[in-house]
Image (cartoon, rainbow, N blue to C red):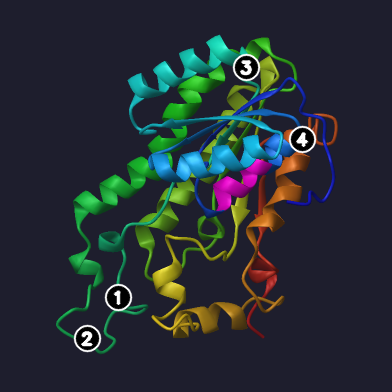
Amino acid sequence: MDLPFQVDLQNKVAVITGGSGVLGSVLSQALARCGAKVAVLARNQEKIDRVVNTINNNGGNARGYSVDVLDQQQLLEVKKQINETWGSIDILINGAGGNHPKATTSQEYYGEKATQDTQTFFDLESAAVDELFQLNFSGTLIPTQVFAKDMPQTSGATIINISSMNAFTPLTKIPAYSGAKAAVTNFTQWLAVHFSKVGIRVNAMAPGFFLTEQNRNLLLDEQGNYTERADKIISQTPMERFGEAEELVGTLLWLVDSRASSFVNGIVVPIDGGFSAYSGV
């Protein structure tokens, strides 16, 4: 991976939840390339090992932990291991999240022609909505409660949450995911104020449309071609393409470097190819 620019993260310890996903793995590798010791947290051990091995084989320093971000006791045990191995934590990237198919409508507009398999707004399962909100919001709050405890004692401590452009304007079909990411954005601002007197900066990144495991079925058909929804997204994106995971790295490095962004606190940075700026006309 080629970095857009280099920042010095030597002797810094970074924790990244959701660190084995399409986007999270790229962020993990970028932090390691800048010298940080990186703890990759996710659920799937095989994917975790793949990211950790890639980092270590390229001269970085990473360890992986299979963990549920909603389980505080598991996170506390991971924190204990990190502290014993590397010391206090300087950087937290809250990247765990995702959508849920049973919290997603089949229709963009109620009243469209329906089939037997159509999932309308009235068919959304409350348990799925609850699970989605827990993963995205509580999955940001609980890791922050655990890993940020080290930060008032460290210099240049920072937390970066992963929100979404859905938080600014909700997208059709995914009301619960849009609402959950809006909560992450609001929480980012709250945390920034709450921690402002102890030197912890809190910001967020809001990716636009990137192809990930969670949205692949919505954006690509079985042959790998763009779906109607994907074509609509591209038509509303001035840069006329989806983002590449590597295009998040520049914003990450800017926000994580206390020299470059020392007075930046409580913001959410859109990374969307102009999607939010385009009126459609």
The dot on residue 280 is none
Crowding at dot 4, Cα within 10 Å, few <14 / some 14-19 / many 20+, comes out as: some
Crowding at dot 1, Cα within 10 Å, few <14 / some 14-19 / many 20+, comes out as: many
Q: Nearer the viewer, residue 86 or 184?
A: 86
Give the mark nearest the N terminus, 1 or 3.
1
Which residue is rendered at x = 56% and y = 45% of the image? 162
For disc 4, the marked residue is: 34
Give the mark nearest the N terminus, 4 or 2.
4
The dot on residue 106 is 1
Q: Amino acid at mark 3?
A: Met
Camera-nearest label, 3 or 4? 4
Residue 262: image location, x then y, percent: 80, 30
Q: Secondary structure at mark 1?
A: loop
Magenta residues, as a range? 23-29
What is the residue that sits farthest to the left in this orientation? Answer: 116
Please indicate, yes or no, whether residue 15 appears anywhere in the rendered image: yes
For disc 2, the marked residue is: 114
Calculate the distance from the C-alpha at mark 1 to the C-alpha at mark 4: 43 Å
Q: Give the side of residue 92 with respect to residue 4, left or right.
A: left
The dot on residue 151 is 3
Location of the C terminus by quadrant is bottom right
Calculate the distance from the C-alpha at mark 3 to the C-alpha at mark 2: 52 Å
Crowding at dot 2, Cα within 10 Å, few <14 / some 14-19 / many 20+, comes out as: few
Camera-nearest label, 1 or 4? 4
Q: Amino acid at mark 1?
A: Ser
Q: Amino acid at mark 4?
A: Cys
